[in-house]
Image (cartoon, coloured by chain):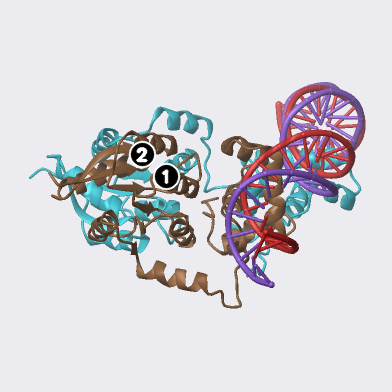
Chain colours: A cyan, B brown, C red, D purple
Amino acid sequence: MGKLQVLLADDHAIVRDGLKQILAETDDLSVVGEAANGIEVVHMVRSRAWDLLVLDISMPGRSGLDLIRLVKDEQPGLPILVLSMHQEEQYAVRALHAGAAGYVTKESDCELLLHAMRRVAHGGVYVSEKVAELMARALRPIGTVLPHTLLSDREYQVFGMLVQGHGLTEIATELSLSVKTISTHKTRILQKMEMGNLSELVRYAIAHHLVDPGDLY
Amino acid sequence: MGKLQVLLADDHAIVRDGLKQILAETDDLSVVGEAANGIEVVHMVRSRAWDLLVLDISMPGRSGLDLIRLVKDEQPGLPILVLSMHQEEQYAVRALHAGAAGYVTKESDCELLLHAMRRVAHGGVYVSEKVAELMARALRPIGTVLPHTLLSDREYQVFGMLVQGHGLTEIATELSLSVKTISTHKTRILQKMEMGNLSELVRYAIAHHLVDPGDLY
DNA sequence: AGTACCTGTAGGAAATATCCTAATGCTGCG
DNA sequence: CGCAGCATTAGGATATTTCCTACAGGTACT
């Protein structure tokens, strides 16, 4: 009777099936609905009341983080536990910021998962120690200021050239500056944008239409 | 006890647990061993005889494709079913080429998975229609060859790591190779893809959904 | 059975980029 | 005014990456 009504959202049917089996063994949790993509999640969330949403943020379609925000927007009271295959805890912090109440990777064993589910379903929060540490460090409102607006003029200029594919030496020549200078700018850019490498910078630039994706076909 | 002895290799404990539950419900399949990484797979394969190896090729460490070859090298008779989370069917073709007897994505439902497992375990081959179609197309290149399909396995692997933002030294360490080797691969990748820098590579990868654009907000 | 090409692997030398540090000038604020 | 803080600029020492070259094993075509 008092079973918690769980909505399971994961694009991997096998993972869903497996989880259903696992939850079927418990006496307090029951999978009442499933969703294989973001659109279904939204539908299901609207269709009835749930005690818990277990969400795989690597689902196709819209960004998983957007989805969290969307769901939270509609049902602020619905607890969300993120189940991710990314070991990169980078996502954890972002997910929690976006409104999730817990974050578990698929590397975890199912004991841990069940523990996290119960906790989150009862209004609690679940984060692993590793993630907690990361949060403490990265506590910053993301949705408010877009990082690239923090760049100074020079930095923004260099940023643009970098994501376009120019090397430091090239940029230095172009701007009649020392390579060291450009390197310093690059370091500051990465720092301000909280990124670690050029690849992320390029992806960011594309996501924000700051660079022509090019006709690479 | 004619149950088929299955070795389950997947780095996600939750996925393994789920699959075990599912197989426990059948009367002809039983999970007798598990492996969470490539090294364990090799150990387990050597330790005893198996009827089937279910392998997640996105496992960390050695390339999944290499692992297939390695296992096939030791136990040519052991059927391998690849269970992948990559929707990119790029891997399917490569996996089958490397010696796998079947390829199932985690998007499949468990009926399909069981069917594939039985088939492969009994010496058969399983490919989904989608994969079959891709194979047909891959075998018969029609004028429009996407440049990244020209990459060798190793090159493709390095390509993936590069666009994900890993540096050469990092990749070299990860793969236990010389940095020079990785550098050579990178040079060849850029050459084959007719590109001049990492930025273009990243843009290409995003355009072709070969990399997670990431939730960079 | 030969040869030509591709793949995977590196070494040494050279180019490029980073790390740490710091000087200069500018701007805003008490 | 004076100082704190950011922007812009580099130097020296280091680290990383590239360039050019090479060699061995495989495949494929002749």
Q: Give the x, y percent position of residue A78.
A: 28, 48
Identify the residue at horizontal 47%, vertical 48% (top origin): B69
Q: Give the answer, above or below, for where A132 lies relative to A120.
A: above
User: Splitting the image into 4 quarters, where does residue D24 fall?
Assistant: top right
Query: In this rendering, would B217 be left or right of A101?
Result: right
Residue B14 visible in the displayed image = yes
Task: State the mark number for residue A42.
Answer: none
Q: Give the x, y percent position of residue A144.
A: 54, 47
Residue at the spot of label 2? B45
Q: Quadrant of the N terminus of chain A?
A: top left
User: Splitting the image into 4 quarters, where does residue B96 fall?
Assistant: bottom left
Residue at the spot of label 1? B71
Query: In this rendering, would A139 be left or right of B105?
Result: right
Q: Secondary structure at mark 2?
A: helix
Residue B58 visible in the displayed image = no
Question: Cβ–Cβ below 8 Å for labels 1 and 2?
Answer: yes
Chain ID of residue with mark 1: B
Query: In this rendering, would B88 be left or right of A6?
Result: right
Q: Secondary structure at mark 1?
A: helix
Q: Which of pointers 1 and 2 lies earlier in the amino acid sequence?
A: 2
Identify the residue at horizontal 23%, vertical 62% (top origin): A47
Q: Amino acid at mark 1?
A: Val
Q: Furthest-bottom residue in view?
A: B143
Q: Nearer the viewer, residue A191 or A11?
A: A11
Identify the residue at horizontal 57%, vertical 50% (top origin): B157
Q: CA distance from mark 1 to mark 2?
A: 7 Å
Q: Amino acid at mark 2?
A: Val
Q: Give the x, y percent position of residue D11.
A: 92, 30
Q: Give the x, y percent position of residue B102.
A: 36, 58
